[in-house]
Image: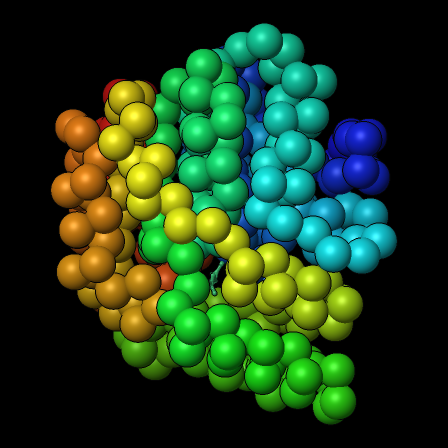
Amino acid sequence: MIVVQTPAGQVAVQVSGTGEPLLLIPGFPLDHRMWNSQLRSLSQSFQVIAPDLRGFGASSKLGGSVSLRDYADDLIAIMEQLAPGRAFTVCGLSMGGYIAWQLVRNWPERVARLILCHTRAAADSPETARGRRIAIEAIRQSGPNAFLQAMLERVLGATTRQQQPELVARVQGWMAAAPAESLIQTLEALATRPDATPWLKAINCPTLVIAGTEDPITPAAEMRELAGQIAGSQFVLLEQVGHLSPCESPEHFDAVLQQFLRI
Ligand code: MLT
């Protein structure tokens, strides 16, 4: 991995391949390892750039509160160093998608294509935000284990949990690596993020929206509706995957990306 200095701290980035830049933004509370398959398969044709967001993986710790805009600022600083002035494809999963909205809203000229996996544009409902604050309190009082166990059961589809015990253990290990303070600060950032729905009509780059049939966090019907709000976007529903299709079914996920990217 390389380490990129941004105005806010150090961000560790896995870079693989050469060519048109492709930025992969992880979901919460994961790091670049969730893109291991894509770092291999897409690096034949792209400069694949997979950062650990600040507070996660090998990046520097969060000094205090953080917002999704802060994460987007970090990513632009990285791209300025790795692909100066160039437009790039952005692929974000869930929270990575929330950060992608920030990129396409604030730097539309830099976003050549958008790939939105298992994400939503709407802000948290009051009930969801309340649930995150309850989780923050629980992590403060008893540590993150119970929160992470509940999250693990929701991010992986039923088929994956039954058929891929090694992947379940791997994802559990990735989640366990997240520091409690990062979980707390990022949960607060998620609870206070803006509603990106009004931004959707301005998106005019080729856009792909990917959902999974077994994803309870960002259900397929909601994602289909999201795709309907982005002019000219493509919607793909992957079978037998939950919220983490790049890990749960990398062959299908990568094939969909390759078709969209015309590799
Ligand atoms: C994620 O996978 O990034 C999270 O599920 C996002 C969220 O909780 O809204």
Measuring 60% from the left and 87% from the top, which residue is drawn there?
A: 146
Does the rendering let one see residue 170? no
Where residue 108 sits in the image (x, y, percent)? 44, 21
Measuring 59% from the left and 77% from the top, which residue is drawn there?
A: 133
Measuring 69% from the left and 25% from the top, which residue is drawn there?
A: 77
Query: In this view of the protein, which residue sits in the foreground, 92 or 74?
Result: 74
Does the rendering let one see residue 125? yes
Which of the 4 image quadrants contains residue 45? top left
Q: Is residue 104 left or right of residue 117?
A: right
Where residue 205 sits in the image (x, y, percent)? 30, 21
Where residue 232 sits in the image (x, y, percent)? 16, 28
Where 254 falls versus 187 (above or below)?
above
Disc count in the image?
Answer: 0
Residue at far top of view: 85
Which of the 4 image quadrants contains residue 163? bottom left
Query: In this view of the protein, which residue sits in the foreground, 218 or 165?
Result: 218
Query: In this view of the protein, which residue sits in the foreground, 146 or 241?
Result: 146
Where 5 falls versus 235 (above or below)?
above
Query: In this view of the protein, which residue sits in the foreground, 110 or 126?
Result: 126
Where residue 204 sits in the image (x, y, percent)? 28, 21
